[in-house]
Amino acid sequence: MKKIITILVLVIIFAAFGGALYYLYQKNQQNPVVYKTEQAEKRTIIKKTVATGTITPREEVPVKPNISGIIEKLFVDAGDTVQVGDLIARLKVVPNVTNLNNSKNQINTARINLNNEKKSYDRQKELFDKGVISANDFDQATTSYNIAKQNLSSAKETFEIIKTGTTAGIGDAATTEIKATITGMVLEVPVKVGNQVIEANNFNEGTTIASIANVNEMIFEGKVDESEVGKIEEGLPLEITVGAIQDKVFDAVLDHIAPQGVEENGAVQFEIEGTLTRDDKIFIRAGLSANASIILEKKEDVLSLKEALIQFDKETDQAYVEVETGDQKFERRDVELGISDGIHVEILSGIDKDDRIKVWNETTGKSKSNQSRG
């Protein structure tokens, strides 16, 4: 029995030894791990953040009436260019019946009063000419007569205003002719002929008849997150891309950052504005959505490397790369990093453009002959 056990043990030992030899043989037959290499290169690196928003005119003015009425005629359409004083619309005033009747009564009352004062004036004048009354008494009669005439004139003007919306006595203070208040392009005419409009006053903002804007000075209005607002400042350059205008980048300058943020969807957003550089060859429509790349820092023609090739020491957090010193032999080199655009990073020191940097993706030896080392 002991002899059988000894034989089994020996068989197991020899089998294990043979298996180990076979494993080592197979492993030796596998292709070795090969690492590609890349070199640093000179490039321009731009560190930026992106804000979304819209393109709007810097100056946009709503034209509102100073009397209420009904649109009788429109003289402009959206897209028309107007000058200050150009006619936009004409209103037709629909008088209030009660006010109109009261105004007529005031005219009749003023006319009756004037007739009485005229009779009194005539009597006083006759007595004054005969020397019966003093000049002071005659002056009082004259004053009362003149006041009565003024009251009748005022009542007539009030009636005219209620009936037509204006009168010759008040000039341009109230008019049924609505005119442009600035020079620019008509962006919108939100009313139609026959629509009723309300005058602007302390209790109502009034009906907008047209919106006019200076489209020669457009701005970008957008928002940035609170995590980014501390990185930007007024005067930074912007690169504006408009979704509706392909393959075109517009230059702008950041000229306003809101001092107070607004919470939106759980995040605090800060409004920003940037003035676009005018381009007479391209017409930018108001309200187009756009993205603004805010250039935080820019360095031209600097030595750079892909960020994917950079490693960091787990203990010291020191950035380093592995530089090829021989055929698939590498050594560690500590590097000092500069600005990054998220893909490439500036190399301040540690390597030069001739060094071959290890790419951290393994390949098999079969493809070694086909690999590029540049």
Image (tube, rainbow, N blue to C red):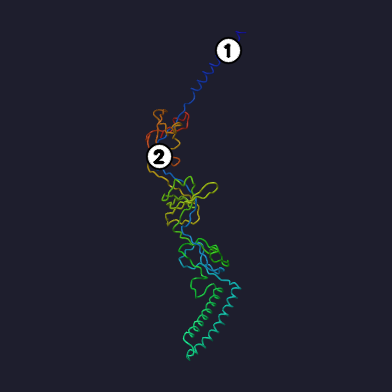
- Front residue of 149/257: it is 149
The relative height of residue 112 versus residue 38 in the rendered view (above or below) is: below
Mark 2 surroundings within 10 Å by alpha-carbon count, few (fewer than 14), some (14 through 19), many (20 or more): some
Label 2 – label 1 distance at C-alpha: 65 Å
| Residue 339 image-quadrant placement | top left
Q: Quadrant of the N terminus?
A: top right
Identify the residue at horizontal 50%, vertical 23% (top origin).
27
Identify the residue at horizontal 52%, vertical 50% (top origin).
262
Q: Quick one: SS at disc 2?
A: strand
Q: Quick one: SS at disc 1?
A: helix
| Residue 204 image-quadrant placement | bottom right
| Left or right, residue 192 beside residue 31 | right
User: What is the three-letter code of the residue carrying label 1?
Assistant: Val
The relative height of residue 329 versus residue 138 in the rendered view (above or below) is: above
Identify the residue at horizontal 49%, vertical 46% (top origin).
226
Q: Quadrant of the C terminus?
A: top left
Q: Residue 202 placed where, x, y %?
A: 53, 64
Q: Residue 37 placed where, x, y %?
A: 42, 33
Q: Residue 130 placed where, x, y %?
A: 48, 91
Residue 9's mark?
1
Earlier in the chain: of badge 2 and badge 1, it is 1
Label 2: which residue?
Answer: 338
